[in-house]
Image: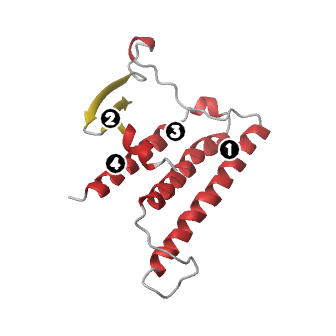
Amino acid sequence: SNKELVQFSSCIDSMNCAMMVGMTTSVKDSESEVALFLHQMIPHHQNAVNMAKALLKTGKLQCDDLTDEESEQADDCALEIILREIVNNQNAQIQAMRAILEAKNYPQESDCKVPIGSEGPSDNKSDANVTTSSLGTSSSISLTIYGASFVTFLSAASMMLAL
């Protein structure tokens, strides 16, 4: 198996997990459809930025000239342009969305608060079960919320995103 691809896949899985957690917003705290949309779109955009940076960081794209449209590198150059546009445009949109939240006096985030263990209520709806494990050079945390399981590979994501 391709060890680098497996590591990259774990990194992407971790980013997707973080995005899903970030998009799990509290409707009652969002105060409006606009705030709810923004609270969910910001982590979605951040995930796209992180994924684009991670692919750029792999060094798998070969592009000596971004204007190249004819050589063997043309497809990689086209993809690199797309990735850089994602990073630039979606970061700008994230800043604009945060400014709208601030201008409308909405909270900057509206994440669901998930009590862990004995800190939470006893209705079991919001209880979270957390387990950790070690996978060689990566550590993982598995979090179950409302029956959905999220796994994050901590060191794989931090290694890939160190741009």
Q: Is residue 16 visible?
A: no
The residue shown at (75%, 38%) is 102
The x, y position of residue 24, in whole percent, is: 50, 37
Q: Please report whichever mark, 1 or 2, sits nearer to the chain's N-terminal start.
A: 1
Q: Which mark is residue 34?
A: 1
User: What residue sits right under mark 3 in the picture?
Assistant: 22
The answer to whether mark 1 and mark 2 are in CB contact below 8 A is no
- Given residues 8 and 137, the one toward you in this image is 137
Depth check, mark 3 against mark 4: the one in front is 4
Q: Please report whichever mark, 2 or 4, sits nearer to the chain's N-terminal start.
A: 4
The x, y position of residue 64, in whole percent, is: 51, 76
Left or right: where does residue 141 sit relative to residue 26?
A: left
Identify the secondary structure beneath mark 4.
helix
The answer to whether mark 3 and mark 4 are in CB contact below 8 A is no
Identify the secondary structure beneath mark 3.
helix
Identify the secondary structure beneath mark 1.
helix
What amino acid is at disc 2?
A: Ser
Q: Which mark is residue 139?
A: 2
Q: Is residue 140 visible?
A: yes
Q: Please report whichever mark, 1 or 4, sits nearer to the chain's N-terminal start.
A: 4
The residue shown at (67%, 38%) is 32
The x, y position of residue 52, in whole percent, is: 50, 58
Depth check, mark 2 against mark 3: the one in front is 2
Density class for disc 2 (Cα within 10 Å; few <14, some 14-19, many ≥20) is: some
What amino acid is at disc 1?
A: Val
Q: Which mark is residue 10?
A: 4
